Image: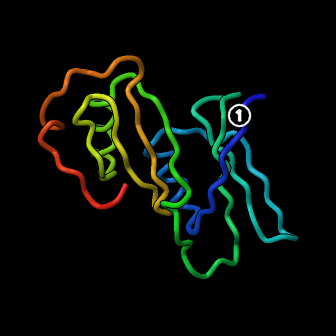
Amino acid sequence: MKFLHTMIRVFDLDKALDFFVDRLGLIETRRHEYPEGRFSLIFLATAENEPEIELTYNWDEKVPYTGGRNFGHLAFSVGNIYEYCEKLQEKGVQILRPPRDGRMAFIRSPDQISVEILQEGKALEPREPWLSMQNQGEW
């Protein structure tokens, strides 16, 4: 058995792609348009042949989805959590749960999907400004 993808529904496709591609750095691996069903499937990954996120965009949705937090979260590992979170902040992403422990941080997509960022390997030594940052909102 191997993991294939996780599906999340997005209300604003442009905002979702800006978040996942332009800010997080994922790549679009494939896209399928279904005019008869009035929806699109966009697959994103960290690299080719890696597990994917399937963004499902229903063309005629009038109201944003609720309960995104009930989904759980997506998780990605990074080489240096402090540098990655700093780059996210520079791109306007709010760090909701800062990496105070040098190991874990949380952010949210425009559709309120929680995204966990984990340090690869052992946790980094705790340091400022992360050490003093408080949690913000829900994550």
Say left or right for 12 vs 107.
right
Colour setup of the view: rainbow
Residue for point 18% across, 37% down:
130
Residue for point 49% across, 35% down:
76
View extreme (bottom): residue: 62
Pointer 1 local density, CA inside 10 Å: few below 14, some 14–19, many at least 20: few
Disc 1 residue type (three-letter): Phe
View extreme (top): residue: 121
Q: x, y (%) of residue 123? A: 31, 22
Q: x, y (%) of residue 132? A: 11, 41
> Quick one: SS at disc 1?
loop
Give the image quarter of residue 78.
top left
Residue 78, above or below 73: above
Residue 47, above or below 61: above
Q: x, y (%) of residue 122? A: 35, 17
Residue for point 31% across, 38% down:
85
The quarter in which the C terminus is drawn is bottom left
Residue 73, above or below 117: below
Q: How many marks?
A: 1
The quarter in which the N terminus is drawn is top right
Q: Find disc 1 in the rendering and name its residue.
A: 3
Q: x, y (%) of residue 18? A: 49, 53
Residue for point 52% across, 68% down:
67
